[in-house]
Image: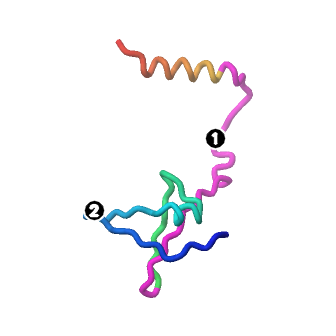
Amino acid sequence: MNKVGDVKSIITSKYQTTISKEVRQYPGIAVKDAIEWRVEKGKVFVYPVKKNFLSYRNTVKVGPGDSADDIEATRHSRLEKYRFG
């Protein structure tokens, strides 16, 4: 792991800030990721929230089917959704 030195950022009038490239790359933070703020003994810690992918296992029930037919049906329904007129 690479060590990241002291990095500063500015807080905007909407209380937003930018996470610098070297900081967001360190824990692997990407667009739309969530971060968790924790205050402990007067210090603020920021942690990336990692989704536990395996916790979703067996939540979607699927049966035998034809992938090609499923893909074609999905394409057709998307075309209908965005069709004008």
The quadrant in which residue 39 appears is bottom left
Is residue 57 one of those drawn in magenta?
yes
Q: Residue furthest left?
A: 13
Residue beneath the point at 44% across and 22% down: 81
> What range is drawn magenta here?
41-69
In the depicted structure, whether residue 39 falls above or below residue 65: below
Q: Quadrant of the C terminus?
A: top left
Give the amino acid type for the residue marked by disc 2 in the picture.
Lys
Return the x and y of residue 19 as percentages of the image width and height: 45, 63
- Between discs 1 and 2, the one toward the N terminus: 2
Q: Which residue lies furthest to the bottom in this view?
A: 41
Q: Look at the numbered disc 1 and give the secondary structure of its residue.
A: loop
- For residue 60, the mark is 1
The quadrant in which residue 64 appears is top right
Residue beneath the point at 62% across and 18% down: 72
Residue beneath the point at 42% across and 86% down: 42
Residue bearing the label numbered 2: 14
